[in-house]
Amino acid sequence: MTALVILIIAAVAFCVVMALAFLVQRGTGNNGWADTFWSFGVGVIGIVSILVSNDMVSSSRKWLVVVLLALWSLRLGGYILLRTLSHDDDPRYARLRKEWGSSANSRMFFFLQSQAFAGVLLVISVYIAAARPDIELEFPDYLGALVMIVALAGEAIADWQLKQFSRNPANRGKICDTGLWRWSRHPNYFFEWLGWVSYVLIAADFDGDYNHGWLTLVAPVLMYVLLRHVSGVPPLEEHMLASRGQAFRDYQRRTSIFFPSPPKE
């Protein structure tokens, strides 16, 4: 199957996936389903796109990318699914619905469709990485795999640390500022972004024979913009300021917002 046909099918499939996410989100009253569908959607659509393609020259690189994408999708999607099944709503989406008022349903539908568009761009980036024409795996491939493993581990640790902090009744109403959260206010988002750098490394061809491999830069740039400036950090910061007030302002003063760095005492 050609790349163009795969792209068209992937785009339509993602629109359908996020339309289903909207229906489930609305039917259950739990906004967390949106990210659950999105995470599994990127994984499944990306993997199927690679497996049905005629463009994959290296079987080793194809399966490397498939495995990395599957690990990412299962970890993130599984984590969000368990959180959603526990009836924990996502404060970002809840805040948007409140702000949008009577037009919340229509605006949410198109908002989720914009997420489908972002998901397709990520699928394209992963596809390009898997299609790099060099037969044998090389140093950039292994480096990309290592970056993804570090990103998955870092995000899992950040999520675990936050969950353990929240479970302690003594921490009710407090700010989690221990472990990775002492170095970044959003370490889970940082490591999520870092994972998409891995595909840039896998697609990199310093011989100049695969110039469009650099198009994979779209993935980390897109994820940085979304996480840092659109749907990730800003709404969560607003939510925390509203719910924690001065305590969160103090946390903002001493802790890096995204990229980990030593805290200011």
Image (cartoon, grey):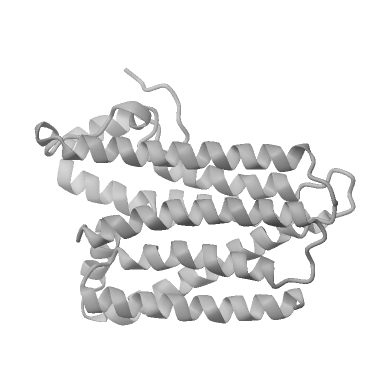
Q: Position of residue 87 (x, y in %)?
A: 19, 61
Q: Which quadrant would the C terminus be assigned to in this image?
A: top left
Q: Nearer the viewer, residue 231 or 7?
A: 7
x then y, percent, for residue 213? 77, 55
The image position of residue 127, as x and y in percent, is 68, 62
| Residue 260, placed above or below residue 263 | below
Instruction: Work out which residue is located at the far top of the displayed protein and give it.
Output: 265
On-image quarter of the N terminus? bottom right
Residue drawn at (54%, 42%) of the image: 194
* Residue 60 visible somewhere in the drawing: yes
Residue 193 placed where, x, y %?
Answer: 52, 46
Q: Measuring 45% from the left and 48% from the top, which residue is drawn there?
A: 228
Identify the residue at image location x=27%, y=67%.
31
**Looking at the rendering, which quadrant does residue 148 occupy?**
top right
For residue 222, say whether it is visible: no
192 is higher (above) or lower (below) than 20 = above
Task: Say above or below: 166 vs 216.
Answer: above
